[in-house]
Amino acid sequence: MFPFVRRRMYTSALPLVIVLLGVFLLARLTGDPTNLYLPESATEAQRAAFAEKNGFDQPILTQLIDYFKGVLHFDFGTSLRTGESASDMALRAFPATLQLAVTTMILAIVGAVIIGCWAAYRPNSLADRFSSLLSMTAASIPDFWFAITGVWLFAVLLGVLPTSGTDGALSWILPIATLMIRPLGVLTQVVRGAMVSALSAPYVRLARSKGASDFRVVSHHALRNAAAPALTVAGDLAVGLINGAVVVEAIFGWPGIGKLMIDAILQRDFAVLQAAVLLTAVSIFVLNIAIDACYALLDARVREPAKV
Amino acid sequence: MSPAPRITTRRRALAVAIAGITVAATGCTVANSGHGGYDPNTLRIVLSQEPPTLEPCESSLTSTGIVVRSNITEPLIEREPDTGELQPLLSTGWRQTSPTEWTFDIRKGVTFSDGSPFTATDAAFAIDRAVNSELQCNVDGYVFGDEKLKLSAPNDTTLTVGTESPDPILPLRISFVEIVPRTTSTTEKVREPIGTGPYAIADWEYGQKLTLARNDRYWGAKPTFARAEYQWRSEGSVRAAMITNDETDIAVGLGPEDGAGALGVPFQNNETTALRMQAGEAPLNDIRVRQAINYSVNRTGIVKALFRGLGEPASQLIPKGVVGYNDQLALWPHDTEKAKQLVAEAKAAGVPVDRQIRLIGRTAQFPKISETIEVLQSEFTEIGLNVKIEMMDTAGQLQYQLRPFPENAGPYVLMIMHGNQAGDAAFTMDQYMLSNGPQSAYGTADFDRQIRAAEALTGQARQDAFAKLFAEEPQQIMQMAYIAHMKGILGKSPRVEYTPNSATGDEMRLSEMTVAQTARTDQS
């Protein structure tokens, strides 16, 4: 198991460097931050001093080398906007996103398994069609629209939930519902499809013939074999959530990494953007390794290279 | 018992443990929740963004100034928002003691919120720090440019400020400098400053909320609310929903469609929208084409249909209340036929009117900007011009707004929104009307001389000279097509008494907010 994880870590290092390089270069292609940070009436001398102080007057290669030197020393630079350490800002924002993402994924997986199994147990029944309609609708709803409609309905019209913020358990409901709706829809369809296939497999028929209960057949025999495709899709969806639930964070005032990255992009706050992307990329690599490790646990062919 | 059930049991236990940890983690965050009511002694405000810093020398940044100015720190002199008149604050009087020197009398009996006394030495330190230091303060670039000041405090109640050349509006410039104690760092900007204002910072949970508490040492009248709590939401409709849902008392930066309803209070801000024409490039280098563009703009229709009346059609780049405003200047007429005729004349004279002109706008610069840009494109196309829309984010648009302009960019018309916070036309003229102004695309040496002459004047002569220049600019240069003096909407809870003014967007004085006579006080 450990050689497998080590192998995956080695192969992840190169993509990580490429991501950092890409973000560094692309961010600088989007324009000079000087105009954003100095007043419109700033003189040429003041603009030059700003560029010099922040190293923007240096050739791009020099800036890149300085940046990678800093990364090796865990120095990710200082925010142009706030004057704070960029890594502190990213590390402060990340747990908020992680909490939201983990809670959302757990609820989405549990919901998808229940609805998907229920629908697959009686294919083409009314329940199956109803759940398919629900899951397809959920997978298709734009999260921005869902969030704003949710605020209007539950906060303004009914007055049962707060509009936004992080104060109180009730304030979690709308952000999680908004984030969950798409993963729930997609995962339900995947679980249903995999379960329909699994429930018609010979080993399920064998289990039934041996007198296993319906619950045991579904939960112990079919679901375990249907887990692999669901795990793949859940992994992709989780990556999307960790990558920044930008819309949800912006609308609900959630102080997470997605909002931080968007602000950093709009403000050309390169150090913060790079720190946030690096942290997110590392998390995604860790998540991918965890997912691969799960595969490896499930399937020995993944764990060990084929021997000729 | 077979091994399989034991593994299953372990897995179940693991799953339960993971779920438990997650719930506990989320629970920790929400454990200290305070939702469900409010403290009547706390004023709740929602902004459109978190202040990046509360450094006082950055208070000409809107997102910083709206919290800091006159709340945490104070200047020596304050500007009356609607008239631009200067009023005493930490300075009780000022006079020009020589052509290049002004003297300020410093108020006695003032202390900073940390208990240290305020004297002329602090005033000299704060101005020196903001203007002469290497901190690269925003207020330095915004108000003082390259000018260096000589500061001295001969005694605790007297401050003298020397300038390199005569400066008739130095007190106005000084009104932009927020005063901090002499112990403030001169090598680094401070995020959480000490000041003499009616409030002091109590707590700042970065990313979530900022709380100010009443400064019990304040020298002036005690403000009504004991605490002020700022939150921030980037979405205007959510800010409006917070007002209607009684989650906040004040919501800034609302648009007409955000849904605040009767709780949205319109007010005249100091912003003016206009199109700046890059007059150095054909076909915009022909004044007939620039005039045609002006004739084609239906300002009244845009204000009525798109802005829903939240604005006034503009004939100049500054609104009423700013020194230099010309109240006799009529709107440029909307006359499509005349515009077509001018374009045809230019075409007959060999001007390449078919050349594509870029119409550049900044996304979300003001409500309905996209629709406004589309209407303008339609109007310009109707008169025979070839116009293509380009919407950009702030950084992208600023490249076209500020010198040095991009090379080989071709002809473009740029939507700008100018806010004259200073209350004097000199700040507008220097930027937009001088031929080499940082935001000016065109001008003449003769007009530059007239601007410089006006800037040297004081009193009524200064007002008259600037007003005359605003009237003459369209005749001589016509770099702009003015659209509207804008209005903002402030969301306001019925429990709060407050009248927004033209400076509210930049400087929202908490001490002016009181409990409304009809307010409920039974919430807790």
Image (spheres, coloured by chain):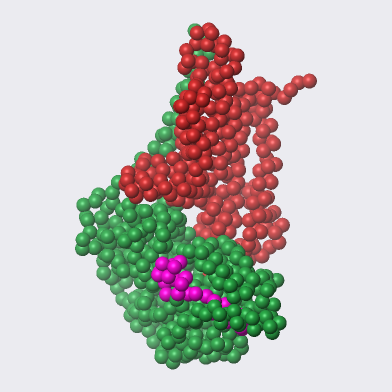
Q: Residue at x 61, y 87 (%)?
A: B444
Q: Residue at x 46, y 42 (%)?
A: A178
Instruction: Say above or below: B168 vs B234.
Output: below
Residue found at the very far front of the displayed protein? B337
Residue found at the very far right of the displayed protein? A308
Instruction: Say above or below: B187 vs B97.
Output: above
**Residue B301 colored in magenta in the image:** yes
Q: Residue at x 56, y 30 (%)?
A: A190
Q: Position of residue A141 (x, y in %)?
A: 49, 43
Q: Quadrant of residue B519?
A: bottom left
Chain A's shade in the image?
red
In depth, the one of B319 and B368 nearer the eye is: B368
Q: Which residues are magenta?
A: B286-312
From this viewpoint, is residue A287 visible? no
Chain B's shade in the image?
green
Q: Quadrant of residue A50?
A: bottom right
Determine whether, in the image, residue B62 is placed left or right of residue B280: left
In depth, the one of A279 and A155 nearer the eye is: A155
Q: Position of residue B247 (x, y in %)?
A: 33, 52
Q: Residue at x 55, y 51 (%)?
A: A261
Q: Main secondary structure of the magenta part?
A: helix
**Residue B291 colored in magenta in the image:** yes
Q: Position of residue B97 (x, y in %)?
A: 42, 89
